[in-house]
């Protein structure tokens, strides 16, 4: 799956976001090593701490389907680029190599591609606990 295809699927997932409080809708599409793709969107909650980001929604969907290694993720904001937050970067680090592609952009505009290591330098991950 190309970066553009992942981006387009993330744009479609954005339409399903539930963001009645912030009105900041985000969509994601996560690519597993086996070629399967999993969509996610942000889901807000009146108890703000219960809110889930689009990236972690996609990871959760993938894990339920038996995919646990990822090679790329596209994250799309509605009105601005929606780079993964710190918690999402850490969750992606748990299941991905440092070279995972992170494709980020705004719906209707272009996107930028970075690696997870660029977004989470000097990270702490599973390999540090062995």
Image (tube, rainbow, N blue to C red):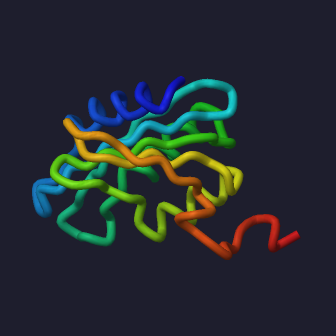
Task: State the image coordinates of residue 17 (x, y, percent, origin top left).
Answer: 23, 43
Residue at left offset 68%, top offset 42%: 69
Residue at left offset 20%, top offset 36%: 108
Task: State the image coordinates of residue 128 (x, y, percent, origin top left).
Answer: 81, 73
Up-down relation of residue 120 to residue 70 (above or below): below
Up-down relation of residue 69 to residue 86 (above or below): above
Task: State the image coordinates of residue 1 (x, y, percent, origin top left).
Answer: 53, 23
Name the quadrant containing residue 70. top right
Query: Residue furthest toward the right?
Result: 130
Count of residue discs: 0
Residue at left offset 30%, top offset 51%: 42
Task: State the image coordinates of residue 67 (x, y, percent, origin top left).
Answer: 64, 35
Residue at left offset 25%, top offset 46%: 106
Q: Which of the two residues, 37 or 21, is positioned nearer the viewer here? A: 37
Up-down relation of residue 47 to residue 68 (above or below): below
Up-down relation of residue 102 to residue 71 (above or below): below
Q: Which of the two residues, 45 or 107, is positioned nearer the viewer here? A: 107
């Amino acid at each position: 799956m190309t970066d553009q295809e992942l981006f387009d699927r993330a744009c479609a997932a954005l339409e399903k976001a539930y963001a009645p409080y912030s009105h900041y809708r985000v969509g994601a599409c996560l690519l597993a090593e086996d070629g399967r793709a999993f969509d996610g969107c942000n889901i807000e909650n009146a108890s703000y701490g219960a809110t889930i980001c689009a990236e972690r929604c996609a990871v959760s969907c993938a894990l339920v389907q038996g995919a646990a290694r990822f090679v790329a993720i596209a994250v799309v904001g509605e009105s601005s680029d929606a780079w993964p937050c710190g918690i999402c970067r850490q969750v992606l680090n748990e299941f991905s190599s440092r070279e995972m592609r992170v494709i980020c952009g705004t719906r209707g505009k272009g996107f930028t591609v970075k690696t997870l290591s660029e977004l989470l330098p000097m990270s702490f991950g599973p390999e540090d606990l062995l």
